[in-house]
């Protein structure tokens, strides 16, 4: 999906259609915005969080069916302090608008089983 920074912005209707298709086929949807891939710029992560806050109606009520990968593989250089600082900024914003879905923040240089709890004290 695109949040409009680099790729065309995916609409709320498109996201809702994809989530419904997954639900109809008994699948869990993992949604992500691809625009900040490989970036270390926290502003790009902020922009993707703003996008998901705008698209929150697709997420809220679908917590059992949708996992949110805020920004695909953000933090390309794997500076753990920058990665943690970025997510410390955006996760509370997402939670404060009612997004309660499971959130993952993957980085291609980090083992896929990494959990936020290793880096961030919530």
Image (cartoon, grey):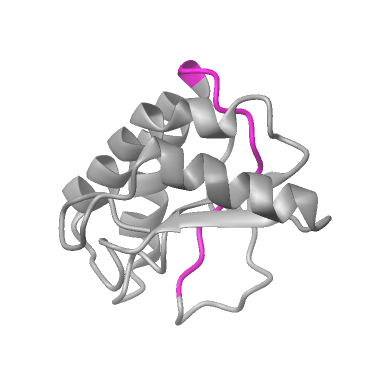
- Residue 103: say if magenta: yes
- Position of residue 92 relative to residue 106, above or below, is above
Q: Position of residue 60 (x, y in %)?
A: 60, 26
Q: Position of residue 51 (x, y in %)?
A: 31, 38
Q: Is residue 44 left or right of residue 73?
A: left
Q: Is residue 120 left or right of residue 117?
A: left
Front in this rendered view, residue 80 or 57: 57
- Position of residue 122 relative to residue 27, above or below, is above
Label tally: 0
Q: Is residue 94 left or right of residue 36?
A: right
- Residue shown at 26% from the left, 61% from the top: 35
Which residues lie in the magenta part? Answer: 96-107
Task: Please identify the quarter of the rendering in which residue 112 is found.
Answer: bottom right
Front in this rendered view, residue 102 or 63: 63
- Residue shown at 66% from the left, 45% from the top: 20
Q: Position of residue 13 (x, y in %)?
A: 43, 38
Q: Quadrant of the C terminus?
A: top right
Front in this rendered view, residue 94 or 114: 94
Q: Quadrant of the N terminus?
A: bottom left
- Residue 52: say if magenta: no
- Residue shown at 54% from the left, 53% from the top: 119
Q: Residue furthest right?
A: 26
- Residue shown at 68% from the left, 25% from the top: 61
- Position of residue 78 relative to residue 48, above or below, is below
Any part of residue 72 in sight? yes
Q: Is residue 79 left or right of residue 99?
A: left
- Position of residue 18 relative to residue 73, above or below, is above
Q: Position of residue 32 (x, y in %)?
A: 46, 56
Any part of residue 103 in sight? no
Task: Please identify the quarter of the rendering in which residue 118 is found.
Answer: bottom right
């Amino acid at each position: 999906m695109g949040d409009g920074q680099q790729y065309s912005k995916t609409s709320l209707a498109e996201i809702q259609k994809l989530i419904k298709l997954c639900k109809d086929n008994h699948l869990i949807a993992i949604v992500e915005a691809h625009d900040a891939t490989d970036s270390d710029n926290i502003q790009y992560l902020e922009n993707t969080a703003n996008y998901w806050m705008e698209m929150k109606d697709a997420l809220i009520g679908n917590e059992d069916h949708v996992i949110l990968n805020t920004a695909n593989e953000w933090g390309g250089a794997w500076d753990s302090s920058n990665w943690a600082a970025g997510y410390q900024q955006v996760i509370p914003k997402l939670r404060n608008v009612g997004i309660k879905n499971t959130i993952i923040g993957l980085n291609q240089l980090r083992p896929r089983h990494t959990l936020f709890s290793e880096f961030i004290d919530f």
